Amino acid sequence: MKIMHIICGPGAGGAEVFVKDMSLEMSRRGHKIHVVFLQTAKESGRQEEFGLRFLKLLLDEGISYEFIGAKSRKNPLLGIITLKRIIKRFNPDIVHSHLYWPLLFLIFIRGFPVIFTKHSIQFGAPKILLQILLTRVSAFVAICEACKKKFLTVAGTKIVQIDNGTSFKVKPEQVDVASPTVRLLYVGRLFAVKNIGLVLHACSELSDLEFELRIAGEGPQLLELQSLAADLKVDHKVNFLGNIEDVSNEMLRTDIFLMSSLSEGLPISLIEASLSGLPCLVTDVGGCGEVIKRCQNGFVVPSGDLFSYSQKLRLMIEDGALRETFSRNAKQRSQHYSIDRAVTQHLNLYQTIL
């Protein structure tokens, strides 16, 4: 098949990484893939170097790409014209949009079926607008059970659940080095909905314990979080890594993976952590609890509950045997989240619609 994916930009976000992994695997299975970005990494406020590596990886695998341009957000007519030209050149059998904006353009471009995936559990637009946009959609992909339940009211019979997956693999030649200090890791964007302040406040409650918190990612809250760590007097235990190239290597050096979000879909970073065999502590938002329930590799606490978060984190830091049990469970039960399964289900969906 000739498959076109449309995503925001070549960045390190979960949706972008998922589309990259999907595109690579679909290409390796013999399909012709074209990735269309709404805007560049710079226009998205993302690290440009990472974006260039993202694009090079696509090209190295024979995957073409184009940009619609950020100006189309303010000028939908420009977006329609630009996307129509791109589609005419590639002539796709099917278009898979991972954003709302392209659906607005695609209403005015016909001749092929459209699949839509919402990569979060938030509507992100008025329901009436979403229902209008979905008139152009043949199938609405929900990335977890919680998302399926949330969007059922607007998507109806078009909704199909396909859990996220990843091509993430721990490099076999790498060997972890034991350390007396329990190593904690957060991976993701540094912005308000991730509620990373909860992690820092929890760490301040556990000052009697020996641990190190490593925070990997970029975002607008970096300076604010660094200041908060200093105010809480935990800055000597916190290391802000920025964007990291090799997440698998960082996870091998980790004992506990942390998420503290106020809202999520089905986080790719949590899936990667589970595939790495990491014990995980997450808040009960989106599909986070589904991953922990399936993999039996950690605890789920109410979102924003500092007391519960701190208590569970203390337990996990102090109890090495518990961490070993969680780790063993993760390695045995996380394969559901492989990219192979996700791609097979998507290709089956495409074939059914075609």
Image (tube, rainbow, N blue to C red):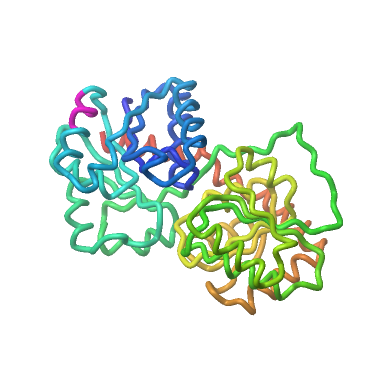
Which residue ends up furthest to the bottom in the rendered image? 307
Res 86 → quadrant: top left
Name the one closer to the observer, 101 or 75: 75
Instruction: Look at the picture and state if 255 lies above or below 317.
Output: above
Name the one closer to the observer, 175 or 53: 53
Name the one closer to the observer, 229 or 292: 229
Horizontal side of 256 relative to 225 (left or right) equals: right
Q: Is residue 87 magenta?
A: yes
Image location of residue 125, percent across then percent down: 26, 60
Instruction: Look at the picture and state if 286 lies above or below 337.
Output: below
Q: Quadrant of the C terminus?
A: top left
Magenta residues?
A: 84-88
Q: Is residue 70 magenta?
A: no
Image location of residue 312, percent across then percent down: 69, 71
Image location of residue 219, percent across then percent down: 50, 53
Q: Quadrant of the N terminus?
A: top left
Residue at image point 65% right, 59% down:
280
Res 315 → quadrant: bottom right
Horizontal side of 180 relative to 90 (left or right) equals: right
**How many numbered marks does the figure carry?**
0
Could you tell me what secondary structure mostly forms the magenta stretch? helix
Horizontal side of 25 relative to 254 (left or right) equals: left
Instruction: Look at the picture and state if 215 lies above or below 72.
Output: below
Residue at image point 27% right, 38% down:
353
